Image (tube, rainbow, N blue to C red):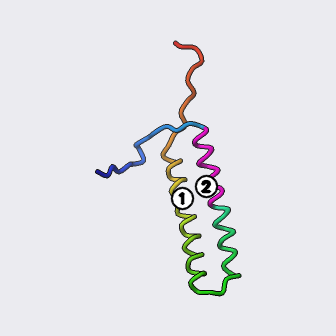
Amino acid sequence: MIIHCTANDGFEISPRFRRTIEERVARLERDSEHDEAQLSLLEDVDHIRRQMRLVAMQRSEALRMRLFLDRSQMRLPRPLIAL
């Protein structure tokens, strides 16, 4: 069974997990820029096609993770003293 999430379906993630995802997004975007710059150095048509596909997948994954972060909220830390 497939469940579709809407923008109103909120969920909470820890600050540490959010930071990890943000770092991964930054790394994917940086790598996609580098890999796209390498296209001018390639000569084989198949290699160029695979490289373009790699760049598209990196950008797609970065976008998917950004959308995930947009739909999530950071979990508040637990109180130190029980109320």
Q: Is residue 13 above or below residue 4?
A: above
Q: Residue at position x 69%, y 74% from top?
A: 37
Q: Main secondary structure of the magenta part?
A: helix
Q: Is residue 57 magenta?
A: no
Quarter-wise, where is residue 59 in the image? bottom right
Q: Position of residue 29 (x, y in %)?
A: 63, 61
22 sits left or right of 12 in the view: right
The residue carrying mark 1 is 63
Q: Residue at position x 61%, y 39% from top?
A: 16
Depth check, front residue: 49 or 11: 49
Query: Could you tell me the amino acid type at mark 2?
Result: Val
Q: Residue at position x 58%, y 86% from top?
A: 45
Query: Could you tell me the amino acid type at mark 1?
Result: Leu
The residue carrying mark 2 is 25
Q: Position of residue 46 (x, y in %)?
A: 56, 84
Depth check, front residue: 44 or 80: 44
Q: Residue at position x 57%, y 70% from top?
A: 54
Which stretch did the figure color magenta? 16-28
Q: Is residue 39 above or below residue 61?
A: below
Label 1 environment density (alpha carbons within 10 Å; few <14, some 14–19, many ≥20) = some
Q: Secondary structure at mark 1?
A: helix
Q: Secondary structure at mark 2?
A: helix
Q: Position of residue 21 (x, y in %)?
A: 59, 48
Marks 1 and 2 sit apart, C-alpha to C-alpha, by 8 Å
Q: Position of residue 28 (x, y in %)?
A: 62, 60
